[in-house]
Image (spheres, rainbow, N blue to C red):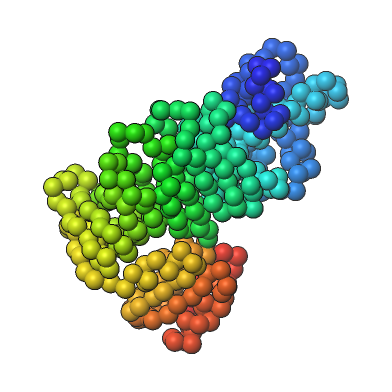
């Protein structure tokens, strides 16, 4: 328990270790009095960033104990223990409900920050302004973070296949250099599971949910495979974009250079080889791959923050705008959904309001923006 307390003070506890500490406090006979909900509320009021975290929720969902008193004990020792305990409960609440502390000590939800899940299940926040080393559970350095990039070392001390998972929320983009030198750009609303180190004699396999652009280092003896729920892409060394968002009707692979093989996960023999400039689109309803020639820039501009639309329906534009700007768009103008647009926007330069005004020059609309929601009338 002493080791766990020391880890807690250093903010190094995993979710499971926090639960062990909570269990200890719940079952301890050394505590004369249990912290009350009034004490929880009082402590939370001293932290401005915790205003949105309900003391009642913490009490109802974690403490699950009857109120033993309505007055915080005046005994200093008990008050100190209770305060520590409330801090631990709050930390577990943050874990359980997808809340995290940033480097500025601000509490934010999981949907607002880039997170890295390590091999032991511990989830850490990746701040785009940080520079730090990445460690495995044995304490060895496996890579480093430099701003909005993660770089994994080509050599580590482990021959065991160990995975990390990077999750990028709406409104953000990020970049990873894998241990084999392959470069992966992750778009908004994307999660990538990948080995900390690729193992000799095994395929280089990653698992994608969302959208990513891959620059794969060539290695003919170790094929690189991108796994999704329904289709996989196999390459030896090439550049391509892959989009697998659950809400889309198709899983799309656009080849920029080299060659890729796209095949159905359940029927590997059903495969298609793409040439540069080709798109392979897996129809989720018909369970088949359709191919055609495209302008690859339309599918890769997001890497530089560009959203490019050509003959796109407004309903399809909405999806990309919501992901890129981390907003919700409620369209009450049914006629607008049927219209086709040619447009381009730069999410790093143009605000949501500027984007909506630009759309209004093509098709007059009335809209209002409330917090992170755009309402079109």
52 left or right of 263 in image: right
- Furthest residue toward top: 29
Between residue 211 and residue 83, name the one nearer to us.
Answer: 211
Vertically, is 55 above or below 305? above
Could you tell me if residue 189 is visible in this image? no
Could you tell me if residue 198 is visible in this image? yes
What residue is shown at x 36% (from left), y 52% (from top)?
Answer: 216
Instruction: Count every numbered label the image shows and give the total.
Output: 0
Indicate the position of residue 295 as horizontal and vertical percent values: 32, 73
123 left or right of 9 in image: left
What residue is shown at x 53% (from left), y 31% (from top)?
Answer: 136
Indicate the position of residue 232 as horizontal and vertical percent values: 26, 49
Between residue 174 and residue 277, name the one nearer to us.
Answer: 277
Vertically, is 360 above or below 179? below
Quadrant housing residue 290: bottom left
Looking at the rendering, in which quadrant would you find the N terminus?
A: top right
Between residue 222 and residue 301, name the one nearer to us.
Answer: 222
Indicate the position of residue 222 as horizontal and vertical percent values: 29, 41
């Amino acid at each position: 328990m002493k080791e766990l307390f020391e880890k807690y003070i250093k903010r190094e506890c995993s979710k499971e270790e926090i639960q062990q500490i909570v269990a200890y406090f719940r079952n301890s006979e050394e505590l004369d009095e249990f912290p009350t909900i009034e004490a929880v509320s009082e402590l939370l009021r001293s932290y401005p960033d915790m205003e949105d975290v309900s003391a009642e929720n913490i009490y109802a969902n974690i403490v699950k104990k009857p109120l033993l008193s309505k007055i915080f004990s005046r005994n200093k020792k008990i008050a100190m223990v209770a305060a520590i305990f409330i801090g631990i409960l709050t930390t577990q609440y943050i874990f359980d409900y997808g809340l995290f502390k940033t480097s500025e000590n601000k509490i934010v939800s999981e949907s607002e920050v880039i997170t890295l899940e390590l091999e032991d299940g511990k989830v850490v926040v990746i701040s785009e302004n940080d520079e730090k080393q990445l460690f495995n559970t044995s304490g060895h350095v496996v890579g480093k973070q430099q701003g909005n990039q993660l770089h994994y070392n080509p050599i580590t001390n482990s021959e065991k296949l160990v995975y990390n998972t990077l999750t990028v929320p709406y409104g953000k983009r990020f970049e990873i250099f894998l241990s084999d030198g392959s470069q992966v750009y992750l778009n908004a609303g994307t999660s990538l599971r990948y080995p900390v180190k690729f193992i000799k004699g095994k395929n280089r396999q990653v698992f994608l949910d969302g959208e990513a652009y891959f620059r794969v280092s060539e290695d003919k003896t170790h094929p690189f495979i991108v796994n999704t729920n329904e289709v996989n892409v196999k390459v030896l060394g090439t550049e391509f974009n892959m989009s697998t968002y659950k809400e889309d009707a198709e899983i799309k692979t656009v080849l920029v250079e080299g060659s890729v093989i796209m095949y159905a996960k359940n029927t590997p023999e059903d495969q298609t080889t793409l040439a540069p400039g080709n798109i392979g689109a897996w129809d989720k309803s018909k369970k088949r791959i359709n191919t055609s020639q495209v302008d690859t820039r339309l599918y890769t501009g997001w890497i530089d923050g560009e959203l490019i639309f050509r003959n796109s329906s407004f309903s399809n534009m909405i999806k990309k705008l919501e992901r890129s700007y981390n907003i919700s768009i409620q369209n009450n103008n049914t006629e607008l959904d049927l219209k086709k647009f040619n447009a381009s926007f730069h999410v790093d330069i143009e605000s949501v309001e500027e984007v909506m005004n630009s759309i209004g020059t093509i098709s007059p609309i009335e809209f209002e923006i409330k917090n992170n929601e755009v309402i079109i009338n």
